[in-house]
Image (cartoon, grey):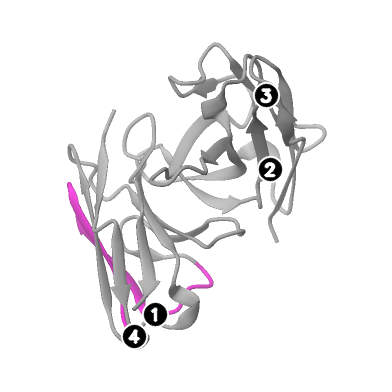
Amino acid sequence: EVHLLESGGGLVQPGGSLVLSCVASGFSFDLYPMSWVRVRQSPGKGLDWVSAISGGGDSTYHADPVRGRFTISRDNSKNTVYLQMNSLRDEDTAQYFCVKGDYGPGGFYYFDHWGRGALVTVSS
Amino acid sequence: EIVMTQSPATLSVSPGESATLSCRASQTVGSDLAWYQHKPGQAPRLLIYGASTRASGFPGRFSGSGSGAEFSLTISGLQSEDFAVYYCQQYNSWPQTFGQGTKVEIK
């Protein structure tokens, strides 16, 4: 059974930094892409993809609102994916989910397993 | 990027009734469309992928249809555990994008 367990959330001041970790189990970790997806607490806000990393860790991608501030990485020896978040802003306040990707026939992937999430609150 | 638009934003349904949720893409995504169910305080769950393939753990009252740019999710005979927010997501091109969600609430 696949399990994804996030940690590292908390309260941080604007401009501050935080690192989220996600430990995975139940599958061959290095064969699958991993992503972070967030849901902000404001009414009308839905799911937003944040960052993604390939199975080998050689390719990373970030959404425009976080590019240059967030960095995704992974340690396949520890079955762990990380999200380094710098220069945090009020609008980064959200529940952050660690997500496993599974490939569709076209080469892109949907998200077949999700962690329970880590709450990040950016506030002074 | 492809914009996904879901309608309605909120759907009020009585238990036992059926609900149909719509999802429209700003350009064709083929059948690379997934649906997710999200309940408060829980992890979102993959419900449908490939536009119509039901993920494990979900009963047959959930069905997805459509291709190209128009998709729908039908829940037949809503039960109490089905009240949640449902999101569509395209994974045909980068970046994967979500719709804004449809909240299915008890009428």
Labels 4, 2: one chain: no
* Left or right relative to A66: residue A74: right
Q: CA distance from mark 1 to mark 3?
A: 48 Å
The relative height of residue A40 versus residue B18 in the rendered view (above or below) is above
Q: CA distance from mark 1 to mark 4?
A: 10 Å
On whether residue B27 falls in the magenta region, the answer is no
* Left or right relative to B87: residue A41: right
- Mark seen at residue A124: 3
- For badge 2, the amino acid type reads Ala
Badge 3 sits on which subunit? A
Residue at 54% in and 11% down: A68
* 3 or 4: mark nearer the eye: 3
Tag 1 residue = B60
- Report crowding for label 2: few under 14, some 14 to 19, many 20 or more residues within 10 A (C-alpha): many
Tag 2 residue = A118
- For badge 4, the amino acid type reads Gly
In this picture, which residue range is highlighted in magenta?
B56-76
* Left or right relative to B48: residue A120: right
- Report crowding for label 3: few under 14, some 14 to 19, many 20 or more residues within 10 A (C-alpha): few
Query: Residue A96 occupies which quadrant of the picture?
Result: top right
Badge 1 sits on which subunit? B
Residue at 31% in and 81% down: B76
- Mark seen at residue A64: none
- Report crowding for label 1: few under 14, some 14 to 19, many 20 or more residues within 10 A (C-alpha): few
* 4 or 2: mark nearer the eye: 2
Q: CA distance from mark 3 to mark 4?
A: 47 Å
Residue B62 x %, y %: 36, 74
Q: CA distance from mark 2 to mark 3?
A: 19 Å
